Image (spheres, rainbow, N blue to C red):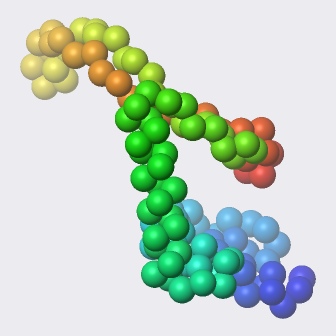
Amino acid sequence: MRKRDRELCARLPIGPAGQIKEMIPMRKQELVRAVAEATETSEAQATKAVNAVFDAIESSLAKGDEVTLSGFGSFKVVERSARSGRNPQTGEEIKIAARKSPVFRPGTQLKRAVE
């Protein structure tokens, strides 16, 4: 294993043989650090870039547009119809209102990378 790979494994929850040590979710700040390191920019600049991407996706979805990132996946808004449900504490039937919900569908390259 190359030195760079060993250093990367030391920061990730993956052991040198590729086994998962523990699952640690990546938070926004960790994503910003990864972008800053990959692009050799400051964390402030990377924060602006990450926020700009999230804002662009959010505004497109708010307009009802679909966002497709080739090889990564697509974001879109789906309509959830009204339905009836039950209150788990009382068993009483309740009405659940219709709503819009954002969904993400992973692309083929992302699916292959995760396997």
- Tell me the quarter of the picture where residue 3 sits: bottom right
- Residue 107: x and y in percent read 71, 39
Q: Looking at the picture, does residue 79 appear above or below residue 74? A: above
Location of residue 62 in the rendering, given as x and y in whole percent from the top left corner: 38, 35
Q: Nearer the viewer, residue 113 or 98?
A: 98
What residue appears at the point 13 percent right and 25 percent down from the top-left corner? Answer: 89
Q: Position of residue 57 (x, y in %)?
A: 48, 45
The residue depicted at 75 percent of the width and 44 percent of the height is: 71
- Residue 51 image point, x, y percent: 44, 62
Pick the residue in front: 1 or 90. 1
Figure quadrant of residue 105? top right
Residue 109 visible to the viewer: yes
Name the residue nearer the viewer: 51 or 78. Answer: 51
Give left or right: position of 95 versus 36.
left
Q: Is residue 85 left or right of residue 2?
A: left
Residue 115 horizontal side relative to residue 74, left or right: right
